[in-house]
Image: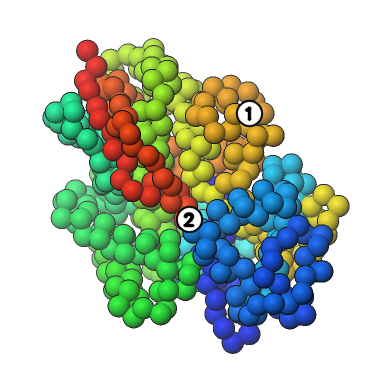
Amino acid sequence: MHFLLLSRHLGKHQVSLGWLQLMKSKCFPSSHQSSSAVAVDAVHDQISSVSLRDGNLPDIIASSSLHEFLVNLHEKYGPLVSFWFGRRLVVSLGSIDLLKQHINPNRLLDPFETMLKSLLRYQSSLNGDTGESHMRRKLYENGVTKSLQSNFALIQKLSEELLAKWLSLPEAQHVPLCQHMLGFAMKSVTQIAMGSSFEDDREVIRFRRHHDAIWSEIGKGFLDGSLDKNMTRKKLYEDALMEMESTLRKVTKERRGRSFNRHIFIDTLLQGSLSDQQILEDTMIFSLAGCIITANLCTWAVYFLTTSEDVQQNLYKEMDCVLGKGPITHEKIEQLRYCRQVLCETVRTAKLTPIAAQLQELEGKVDQHTIPKETLVLYALGVMLQDSSSWPSPYKFDPERFNEESAMKNLSLLGFSGSQECPELRFAYMVATVLLSVLVRKLYLHPVKGQVMETKYELVTSPKEEAWITVSKRS
């Protein structure tokens, strides 16, 4: 899964576009400025008509999200388009075929972590020693792998607790799915990242308060620039960030040089040669991103299961065949092929992460078009994930489409499977698999009649309002 925040200065002004804050770049001549977003061949024929600071920013805000802006743009102009952000030309690719053709000789950067580090004003790995960055990346990935292995029983326990909570409810009672999945994800991530002090629900609640304050601004405040204009909101954001950092420093100090029964994420970082600041940054990234990706993957997976009795029954049959009455094990997860297809189709149908970006550090190509050096290239993943030329019946929730090797290959090309998936998504896949193995074998999951699900497209896609379901016990 690719994410990249690139920051560049536009003259004296710092302009925010969601997670695209463009810093230090060479600006395009004002004579080529335009308020219109157009097919890439025609862009230089447009005439200046808007403020150099704005470009298409008003159009993006009017569209409610960058994803929805790109959907409209690609529908109108085709799979290869460009638009203006301030004085900066941005190119967007809207098909998997173009993604395959994109020739970008620059080095690959870790996308999600780089994006969040820039938003949090942490030191980005955009500049610095490539070998050191690679070593730090491997340490981060190993931390996720080892903490999942060491805490597998914990994930099972938290899943069983959620099951018990749902079983205790009257069958007709509406369950607030988003709220429960976020709580479940936060309990999982905080204990796996930072240890047993988060077994205390009061600590989790405090973490959630700070997490919500930070993530809400990452989702919105950086899109429209409103955070810097509202001192009250900015103070709440900065206070929440400071409190979370204080907690992470405390955990680092407590665990340094000591051994514990249960290995957690931060222990792996402490075993490396990272500074205290680097440990803080990487734990913050995993805590923030791990929570939001896991919560939304679980939310959408359960929600989509309520909308398809056949898929839910097929998943139950696989769970029953592979696991029987026993608990899920790390080894048996690989046998749950249909479950993995359900989660892949959840990512695709929900458009879990709708945008990716790369800086064209050196001149490159896509198809017959040259991409100049310093161009910001967007991958409109949300557009590609529902492109009918790549996905037959793209709006249908159909896990069996991943019986085809070509479908899984497409998902891997987009960064949602295989070697390109980010550690946070790999973590979320594992946690969601354990949760579904517990819930689906004991419960029927039902939709609430008349509910209209609207979507909020930010860095990670979520329901715009609470998603309600009901459950009943399997006989």
Q: Residue at x 67, y 70 (%)?
A: 35
**Image coordinates for residue 267, horizontal then vertical, percent:** 35, 53
Label 2's element?
Answer: loop
Query: Label 1, on which residue?
Result: 392
Residue type pointed to by label 1: Pro
Residue 19 in view, yes or no: no
**Image coordinates for residue 422, horizontal then vertical, percent:** 52, 47
Residue 50 in view, yes or no: yes
Residue type pointed to by label 2: Leu
**Image coordinates for residue 132, horizontal then vertical, percent:** 57, 63
Task: Give the quadrant of the C terminus.
Answer: top left
Q: Residue at x 21, y 20 (%)?
A: 473
Query: Label 2, on which residue?
Result: 459
Up-down relation of residue 433 to residue 147 (above or below): above
Up-down relation of residue 381 to residue 372 (above or below): above
**Image coordinates for residue 110, horizontal then vertical, percent:** 57, 56
Q: Residue at x 59, y 39 (%)?
A: 386
Q: What is the total number of numbered labels drawn onto the structure image?
A: 2
Identity of the residue furthest to the bottom in this view? 12
Label 1's element?
Answer: loop
306 relative to 112 in the view: left or right: left
The image quadrant that residue 242 belongs to is: bottom left
414 relative to 281 in the view: left or right: right
